[in-house]
Amino acid sequence: EGTFLWGGRFERKPDAETVAFSTSIGEDYRLYPFDILGSIAHCMMLERVGIISQQEREELCDGLRSIYRELQEGKIDFTPFEDIHSLVEHRLRELKGQVADKLHTARSRNDQIVLDERLYLREMIAVVIEKIITLQERILEQARAYPDLVMPGFTHFQPAQPVLYAYHMMAYFYMLERDIERFWDSLKRVNVLPLGAGALAGTSLPIDREYVASLLAFPKVQENGMDAVSDRDFILEFLFDLLSLFVHLSRLSEELVVWSSPLFGFIEMDEALTTGSSIMPQKKNPDLAELLRGKCGEFLGALVSLAATLKGLPLAYNRDLQQDKKPLFRSAEEALSSLDIAAKLVAGMRPLPQNMEQALKKGFLTATDLAEFLVEKGVPFRKAHHLVGRIVRKMLEEGRELTSLRAEDLGEYASLFEETLKERLDEQKSPLFKKSLGSTAPDEVRRQVVQAEINLEQW
Ligand code: ARG
């Protein structure tokens, strides 16, 4: 019967091309720890319900543990096998003889594969969350290290209003917070036991799915077997959650690229995380940030690829489902290394305050502060907005900055002019005047940092 699990009804072996085209071992070998764990739980259940004896269970589990060790040590060549399930069962027969023929009782590869994937994914999600937390910690460190640093905030990539660098950093913290929540929430849909669905219809043998669920720490058993073997939406969700995470990280990377350009000079990046040019000797290029920015496309591709595979599949299992492996594994592995790089990039950022200060002087960033001052004095906002617009227009022509404001610039509102306005129009001080919850006022940013620390502890 060779390395296949299904020789009986066939006269001939599948030809080499059939095998090469349909095999999945090149991807699903990664599932071996989960496949073996699932098989051990399955054996324990088979014994408990009396389908196999205690001695058989001991033999099987002993063999499974040996195979785990062999695979861990790289002692098994997995290339001749169709998939990880065939490999394990085949090796079990080599090690333990006939008793191996009982392992697959009341089980199909259809419920087995999706069990493996669920076990894999819940571990992967835990690692992803951990790595996002590390990145959040690096972001918090930046926010804490420069509590008073002021920089231009942008809308439409035009200078808008002064903000604290820490405030800008905390924006990313809170994006990542939602990403963690999404992953965390998804666990309740990942953590459901499919095993026991059999090929699709369940089994006439007296299995105990709830016992298997308890052994594998699944709080729930999947209610419907056809759903259990067909369902890959928990993977689709994981890929979307990664996409959201990497949409955020691509925005962060983009800012690192822009800020580190000498045209901005807002930050200096750690040399170890940049590269040079083979022709232009002066270059220090932000390649890692660019690669991180570019990863997003792969996650989007993975999501679209799986959605396209799932769309229109009739129930229940179809071999198309095997093609969930590449998007899943590729994305998961890519995510881990990218998150490590993201954390390093953030840790390696050094803001350059002089350049930020220079940049703040261009673009009338305190124009809104002036309008709000006038509102405080009773001027209706739209009127104040128009007046400040006129002032900006005039100052542009005269080559002046807002801090040079004099009473006569206010025209009919000249009487409202106060010496203290100088401070109010000072870009460096602008954040101090903000009063709203969630604003860039230093006290408020400090509160956001404290709240972030509390949130971090809860995970
Ligand atoms: N390699 C398959 C997959 O990844 C496992 C299930 C195979 N089942 C089958 N009936 N051919 O989906």
Image (tube, rainbow, N blue to C red):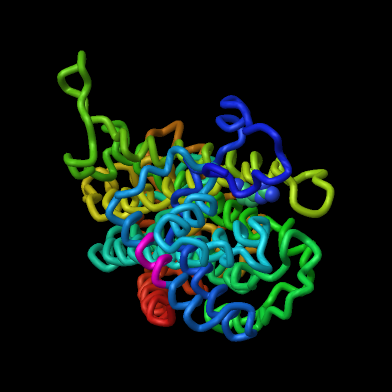
Does residue 246 appear to the left or right of 342 in the view shown? right
Nearest to the observer: residue 29 or residue 10 = 10
Q: Is residue 21 above or below residue 322?
A: above
- Extent of the magenta region: 62-67
Vertical placement of residue 145 versus 159, above or below? below
Which secondary structure dominates the residues rendered in magenta? helix
In the rendered image, is residue 443 in sight? no
Seen at 42% across and 74% down, the residue is: 448
Residue at position x 19%, y 44% from top? 270
Residue, x 41% and y 66% (percent of image)?
Answer: 63
Furthest-top residue in this view: 279
101 versus 453 height, above or below: above
Residue 71: percent from the left, percent from the top?
Answer: 35, 54
* Left or right, 370 with reference to 338: right
Please give the name of the residue rendered at 35% of the width and 40% of the height, measured from the top-left corner. Answer: 289
Q: Quadrant of the N terminus?
A: top right
User: Does the stretch in magenta take in 66?
Assistant: yes
Residue 54 placement (x, y as % from top left): 50, 83
